Image: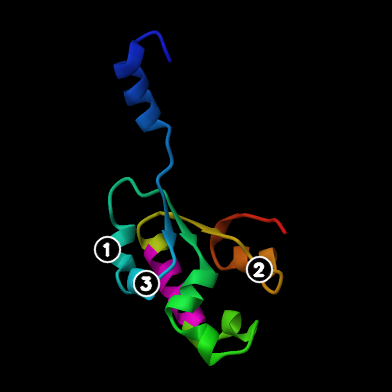
């Protein structure tokens, strides 16, 4: 806790917490300008697998072609523009077919890596 008890902790914690939202649906991309403008949103995480599924790209393209489709690139551009306009950090979990360096050049400052 802290010396001010629960009330002191809650105030301090709220000042030191990151509000991260996952962007995983076509509806989210459709409304991303409004979502990114919500006060207190610090970070937008692109969940590209779920987004591809929501957009119907798994049915339209062979793996891994959906990651390089015009539709996903357009959605990602819209996300990047909304984040930049609202000073929100972008987060991405690159798939093995999308190297981190290329993604970071597109404005994603936080990359999660793993296997």
Q: Are marks 3 and 2 in contact (CB under 8 Å)?
A: no
Classify 10 Å Cα crowding around label 3: few (below 14), some (14-19), many (20 and above): many
Cα separation, mark 3 vs mark 2, equals 20 Å
Find residue 96 and report its horizontal and vertical position in percent: 71, 69
Sequence-first disc among 3 and 2: 3
- The magenta stretch is 72-82
Cα separation, mark 2 vs mark 1, equals 28 Å
Residue 56 falls within the magenta-colored stretch: no
Q: On residue 34, which mark appears?
A: 1
Residue sitting farthest toward the bottom: 60
**Residue shown at 36%/62% (left/top)?**
85
Residue sitting farthest toward the front: 59
The reply, left or right, for residue 105 in relation to residue 41 is right
**Residue shown at 43%/81% (left/top)?**
55
Find residue 67 and report its horizontal and vertical position in percent: 59, 79
Q: SS at mark 1? A: helix
Q: On residue 95, which mark appears?
A: 2
**Number of labelled discs?**
3
The quadrant of the picture occupied by the N terminus is top left
Q: Nearer the viewer, mark 3 or mark 1?
A: 3
The reply, left or right, for residue 105 in relation to residue 48 is right
Q: SS at mark 3? A: helix
Find residue 81 and report its horizontal and vertical position in percent: 41, 68
- In this figure, which residue is indicated by the disc labeled 3? 29
Sequence-first disc among 2 and 1: 1
Q: On residue 57, which mark appears?
A: none
The quadrant of the picture occupied by the C terminus is bottom right
User: Depth check: 96 or 99 in front?
Assistant: 96
């Amino acid at each position: 806790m802290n010396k001010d008890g629960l009330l002191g902790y809650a105030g301090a914690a709220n000042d030191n917490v990151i509000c991260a939202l996952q962007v995983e649906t076509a509806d989210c991309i459709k409304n991303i300008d409004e979502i990114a403008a919500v006060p207190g949103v610090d970070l937008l995480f692109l969940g590209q697998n779920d987004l591809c599924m929501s957009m119907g790209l798994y049915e339209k393209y062979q793996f891994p072609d959906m990651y390089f489709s015009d539709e996903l690139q357009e959605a990602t551009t819209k996300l990047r523009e909304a984040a930049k306009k609202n000073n929100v950090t972008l987060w991405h979990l690159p798939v093995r077919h999308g190297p981190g360096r290329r993604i970071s050049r597109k404005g994603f400052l936080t990359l999660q890596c793993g296997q």
